[in-house]
Image (spheres, rainbow, N blue to C red):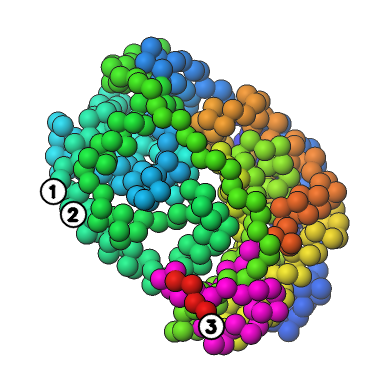
Amino acid sequence: MKRTVLFLMTAVFALGTGSAILLGQEGNKSIPLSKVVRLNRAPVNKEILRVKLPRPREIKLDNGLDVLVLERHKLPTVAFMLWIKAGALNDPRDLPGLAKFTADMLREGTTHRTSAQLAADVDDIGATLRASANFGRSVSVVTASGLVENTDRILELMSDTVLNPAFPAAELVKYKKRQLANLQQMRSQPDFLAYERFYRVLYREFPASAVSATPESLNRVTRDDLERFHHEYYAPNNAILGVVGDVQYDAIVPLIKKYFGNWESHPVPESNLGSVPAPATAKVVLVDRPDSVQTNIMAGDYALRRNDPDFIALTVTNHILGGGPAARLFLDLREEKGYTYGAYSYFQSDVYPGPWIASTQVRTSVTDGSMQALMAEFRMIRDEAVPEKELDEARRAIIAGFALSLEQPTTLLNAWLTVDYYKLPQDYWDQYPQKVAQVTPGVVREAARKYIDLDHLQVVCVGNGKQIKKALEKYGPVEVYDTNGKRLE
């Protein structure tokens, strides 16, 4: 712990190495980035962070439930995370959103409590109790947390929610009304339209292509559908339960057995997701939104699975390109050219290759210039070796962020659940800082060439078709859709 705290103090100074002073009036956009002077006066510790994360103790209950116990006695709190190994990827093709509906409805009443009673019981002890099944994910997640003095009560409420949901018909009717209103509101947002079309273009028939429920699936879903999904997938032999906080292993395990030990196991359907489609030829898709005064641009392709050996290399590469306000996309499109308030890139990973995405929102009049800038940045990181100084700052920022995250108990627990679920090496996080520090300019260029694939780059733009279509045609064949997803001639 002393070593971690010492590093955190050092990391604050290390992050300052990227600071700069403009020669001239502060904020003067007439001064190009090439004139920025980096003073580099902040002291930097050149040693690589050495960590050894506290390891959880593991136990498998008789019913097959994997349990991870991570003792952290800094605060008098406790948190539980339950990962069910089935999520939105397991939705029936004709019922997108079923995993989300099931998770959302867990808190709407059990066989022992109404929705109002459950909410009151959680509030009485100042606890939290949530459930989710995000689109594109292979898991559903239930979390609960509160003061350690209420551990028994928190576990009782959590287990009642997971094991005994009632899915009351009256609450389902209310839920549908709320979700239908949310869907309508979402479809009015250009960023959602870009996100939706990008995933459809990239994943096509693969389950990850769905990013939201539909009015049809909401209207069709029944209480029986929720019960069936819950019965098929919510089983102890298909789950991992993690606990972190001011607990003792010998005391918490009997409590977990008390509330989850009688959860009956049963065979679970195999998740046969199939393979993602082969990368498509590069193209541009336009979602015509005539009233738009800006263009939402989203470009990308497949990234990788969570257990892929390239994960760290792509993490560093993406950080340099678009990982934050000190990255190339932000500095070029916002600071240098003034096209946007922000430009970023990120990637996701799961049991299937998630997407790598670069995105920005720009004024309609600078759509062409923004596309040129994005393509230029993509080509540069693929073709030119990243300067050692820029790479060093990226590596240090990633390691510093990792060190700071170690102070959050739930982040630590999530890290170990990730190791367990994706079958990563047990020393994965111990080796993480060193492996980040070992990424070289050659490794970055190799990762960029592999994952920023310009021959298969899929670009989605949401904006005023009459004003931007001709500009987009410079970058490949253009497919046009309306805001409801209908293909236009």
Pick the front one: 162 or 211? 211
Can I make out residue 53 in this image? no
Residue 149, given in percent of the width and then of the height, sits at 30, 26
Q: Which residues are magenta?
A: 457-485
Q: Earlier in the sequence, mark 3 or mark 2?
A: 2
Residue 234, given in percent of the width and then of the height, sits at 34, 30
Disc 1, SS: helix
Can I make out residue 211 in this image? yes
Contact between labelled residues 2 and 1, with CB atoms less than 8 Å apart: yes
Q: CA distance from mark 3 to mark 2?
A: 38 Å
**Picture residue at 75% right of the left edge, 35% below the top:** 434
The answer to whether residue 47 is magenta is no
Would you name the residue on which mark 2 appears? 174
The answer to whether residue 462 is magenta is yes
Residue 119, given in percent of the width and then of the height, sits at 20, 42
Would you name the residue on which mark 3 appears? 465
Q: CA distance from mark 1 to mark 2?
A: 7 Å
